Image (spheres, rainbow, N blue to C red):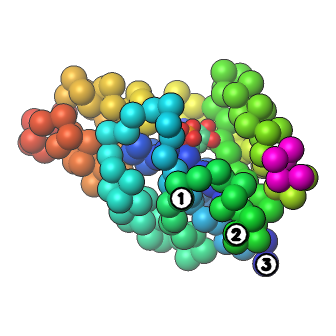
Amino acid sequence: MKTAVYPGSFDPVTYGHIDIIERAAETFDKVVVLVSINSAKSALFSLDERVTMLQQAVREFGNVEIASFDGLVIEYCRQHGIHTIVRGLRAVTDFEYELQIAQTNRELSQDHVDTVFLTTDLRYSYLSSSIVKEIASYNGNIQPCVPEFVARAVYAKFGFAEVEAK
Ligand code: ADP
């Protein structure tokens, strides 16, 4: 059975992430979406909130599981016998960073863990969790970016009632 882990902050999950999860779930027998603490980014949502939103977002996919982990992704892989990491690529700007992380993970895992990249669906190439938060902080329209229940949760964080949200 071929399992892949898709790690990220998912703060919050967007349609860009969901598209990658769906396509990974078609390629692998099982996909574990691993919500991790990113020390370089301060999160809007708690780890539990991010996990709960992801669980709702992937409900329809039978072979996707949500987990959280406070540690190196390769350590999670080692503990669970997983050899593949999935990451999404939006643009060249992602590439340099992702290449470095992928090579580091391969090196640290002594060649046991490889990274597979899925290119973004062009509809979502502009989309990031940061952009969603930026738009929502001004009560802008994030409906095209995230599922309805996520939009509600994001607006609430910025003190906007659902009815106000455009
Ligand atoms: P991280 O903080 O680890 O970058 P993110 O939640 O921002 O976590 O992203 C997780 C993964 O999803 C990364 O590989 C990122 O490139 C990818 N990703 C994010 N947004 C999109 C998108 N719109 N299309 C494709 N991949 C995406």
> What residue sits 48% from the left and 46% below the top?
37
Of circles 3 and 1, the one toward us is 1
Q: Magenta segment, which residues?
A: 106-110
Residue of label 2? 79
| Three-letter code, disc 1 | Phe
| Three-letter code, disc 2 | Gln
Residue of label 3? 1
Could you give the CA–CA distance between mark 3 and mark 1, rounded to whole angstroms? 22 Å
| Helix, strand or loop for disc 1 | strand
Of the image marks 1 and 2, the number of the one nearer the N terminus: 1
Could you give the CA–CA distance between mark 1 and mark 2, rounded to whole angstroms? 11 Å
Task: Give residue 121's position: percent from left, percent from top.
Answer: 62, 40
Task: Give residue 6's position: percent from left, percent from top.
Answer: 63, 54
Q: In this view, does 147 lie to the left or right of 154?
A: right
Q: In this view, does 151 lie to the left or right of 161?
A: right
Please say whether residue 53 is visible from this viewpoint.
no
Residue of label 1? 69
Please say whether residue 49 is visible from this viewpoint.
yes
| Three-letter code, disc 3 | Met
